[in-house]
């Protein structure tokens, strides 16, 4: 069945991301915005801890958006994704980096030896895997002692007021209907959401911020820094995905500790939550 869960993979979710990244391959993402996004996601990543010719992995590389930047700083980068179509997008994005290797595999079947990697990261992926803790455990096993591992996992709005959470619950009702649509319709509907909801709220928060007002608790305020291309991508990501889980910062840190990571550091800025730990 299309929605069957095997090997800690939700097949329908994986198929959806293959469709998403094949369409939004991030080739139209403005270079400056790409760099700004990268800097925010990797804000707490300890680049200085990596050896000069480090070997590491990107679990759930998707479009290769982050791998393109990471490949500039490391020796060998393993790009791993459970979606074959998504992996093809990554291959095209990283054709200028011969030191990259590509693997179509799940988090539970990473194709390298335990204790072999100098670093790893998984951004926006683990919350789409049925057993997030087990996937995290598998990733950490591949790291050498002292190697850093960075995650971005959807937050449970633990830093937001009650009404913000209520707005999300209403939006989640929409998601549960939209993800069931064929991809063409799913893409059209989320484009409309980006135009009628994301863009106006992002522009409003931008104006308010320029007036000196605090906008952190305004829904979608973080998109005041982003292009409409990113809004369309993220609207499809948010509303077009079957499996979505959310965790508090305390829960994320608890999972990372249980997986064998220590010295946990989180970014206090959006996107929430980006957390980095060191393998014990």
Image (cartoon, rainbow, N blue to C red):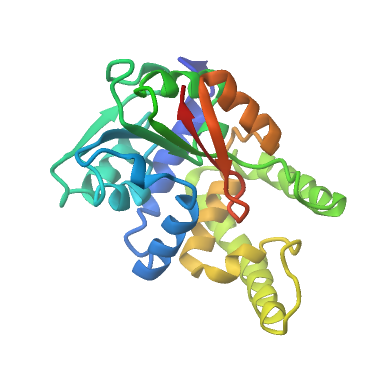
Q: In the figure, 136 relative to 179: above or below? A: above
Residue 106, image x and y in percent? 39, 23
Q: Is residue 186 visible?
A: yes
Q: In the figure, 242 relative to 185: above or below? A: above
**Quadrant of the rendered structure where residue 249 is?**
top right
Q: In the figure, 163 relative to 143: above or below? A: below
Q: Residue furthest right?
A: 162
Residue 108, image x and y in percent? 42, 17
Instruction: State left or right for residue 91 relative to residue 49.
Output: left
Q: Residue at x 49, y 61 (%)?
A: 230
Residue 107, image x and y in percent? 42, 23
* Numbered label tally: 0
Q: Residue at x 60, y 24 (%)?
A: 255
**Quadrant of the rendered structure where residue 263 is?**
top right
Q: Nearer the viewer, residue 114 or 93?
A: 114
Q: Nearer the viewer, residue 269 or 53?
A: 53
Residue 45, image x and y in percent? 44, 45
Q: Residue furthest bottom?
A: 211
Q: Is residue 128 visible?
A: no
Q: Nearer the viewer, residue 181 or 13?
A: 13
Q: Residue at x 37, y 32 (%)?
A: 83
Q: Residue at x 44, y 18 (%)?
A: 138
**Quadrant of the rendered structure where residue 140 is?**
top left
């Amino acid at each position: 069945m299309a929605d069957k869960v095997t090997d800690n993979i939700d097949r329908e979710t994986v198929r959806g991301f293959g469709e998403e990244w094949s369409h939004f391959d991030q080739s139209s993402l403005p270079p400056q915005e790409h760099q700004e996004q990268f800097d925010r996601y990797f804000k707490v990543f300890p680049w200085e801890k990596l050896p000069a010719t480090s070997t590491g992995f990107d679990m759930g590389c998707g479009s290769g958006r982050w791998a393109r930047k990471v490949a500039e700083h490391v020796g060998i980068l393993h790009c791993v994704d459970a979606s074959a179509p998504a992996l093809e997008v990554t291959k095209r994005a990283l054709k200028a980096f011969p030191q990259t290797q590509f693997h179509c595999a799940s988090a539970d079947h990473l194709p390298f030896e335990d204790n072999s990697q100098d670093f790893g990261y998984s951004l926006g992926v683990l919350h789409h895997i049925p057993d997030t803790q087990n996937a995290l455990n598998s990733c950490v096993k591949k790291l050498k002692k002292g190697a850093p591992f960075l995650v971005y996992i959807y937050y449970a709005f633990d830093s937001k007021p009650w009404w913000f959470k209520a707005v999300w619950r209403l939006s989640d009702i929409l998601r549960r209907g939209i993800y069931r649509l064929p991809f063409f319709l799913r893409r059209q509907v989320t484009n409309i959401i980006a135009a009628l909801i994301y863009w106006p709220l992002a522009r409003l928060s931008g104006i308010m911020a320029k007036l000196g007002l605090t906008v952190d608790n305004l829904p979608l305020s973080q998109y005041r820094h982003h292009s409409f291309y990113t809004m369309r991508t993220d609207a499809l990501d948010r509303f077009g995905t079957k499996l979505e889980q959310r965790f508090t910062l305390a829960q994320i840190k608890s999972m990372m500790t249980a997986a064998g990571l220590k010295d946990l550091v989180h970014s206090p800025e959006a996107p929430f939550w980006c957390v980095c730990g060191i393998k014990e």
